[in-house]
Amino acid sequence: MVFHKSFPGAPFSESVEVDGVLYLSGQLGTDANLKLPDGMVAQGRQVMENIKAAVEKRGLTMDHVFKCTVMMADMKQWGDFNKIYVTYFKPDRLPARSAFGTNGLALGALLEVECLAKMR
């Protein structure tokens, strides 16, 4: 197993490699200063950019992502997030996915997404 550190002081790894799979911790829509933008659209874009950056940091692309789990504070915004989500994947390479509503996410985020990616 290979553990990749998160930001200083975080109680979790950004990702862990196990048997050819990259397990990416849940990503919020925070910027480099750990600030959340307002609204689902802005947070959704930032979540996906954070996922893309974390995957690319390991030498992979979004094509390697094969499973995502989406946690949302308000499932009524599911459609809004889907419009953003699909732009990060090729139409024939959409990952398997689960989504569910929650009664609270870290930092008051509107959504959190965790992903699995196949290592090369």
Image: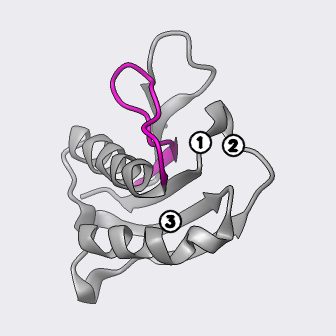
Q: Residue furthest top?
A: 9
Q: What is the CA distance from the residue labelled 2 to the residue labelled 3?
A: 17 Å
Residue occupying the point 35% across, 80% down: 94
Kind of residue at disc 3:
Cys
Neighbour class for label 3 at 10 Å: few (<14), some, many (≥20)?
some
Spot occupied by residue 26 in the image (x, y as percentages of width and height): 55, 45
Residue occupying the point 33% across, 24% down: 32
Name the residue beneath numbered marker 3: 68
Closer to the chain start, of discs 1 and 3, is: 3
Q: What is the CA distance from the residue labelled 2 to the residue labelled 1?
A: 5 Å
CB of mark 2 within 8 Å of CB of mark 3?
A: no
Name the residue beneath numbered marker 1: 109
Spot occupied by residue 51 in the image (x, y as percentages of width and height): 36, 49
Residue occupying the point 59% across, 27% down: 12
CB of mark 2 within 8 Å of CB of mark 1?
A: yes
Question: Which of 16 and 25 lies nearest the eye of the viewer?
Answer: 25
Compared to residue 100, the image places residue 110 above or below, namely: above
Quarter where residue 120 is shown: bottom left
Q: Residue furthest right?
A: 103
Name the residue beneath numbered marker 2: 105
Q: Please give the range of residues in magenta.
A: 21-39
Spot occupied by residue 68 in the image (x, y as percentages of width and height): 50, 65
Question: Which of 107 and 37 lies nearest the eye of the viewer?
Answer: 37
55 on left or right of 82: left
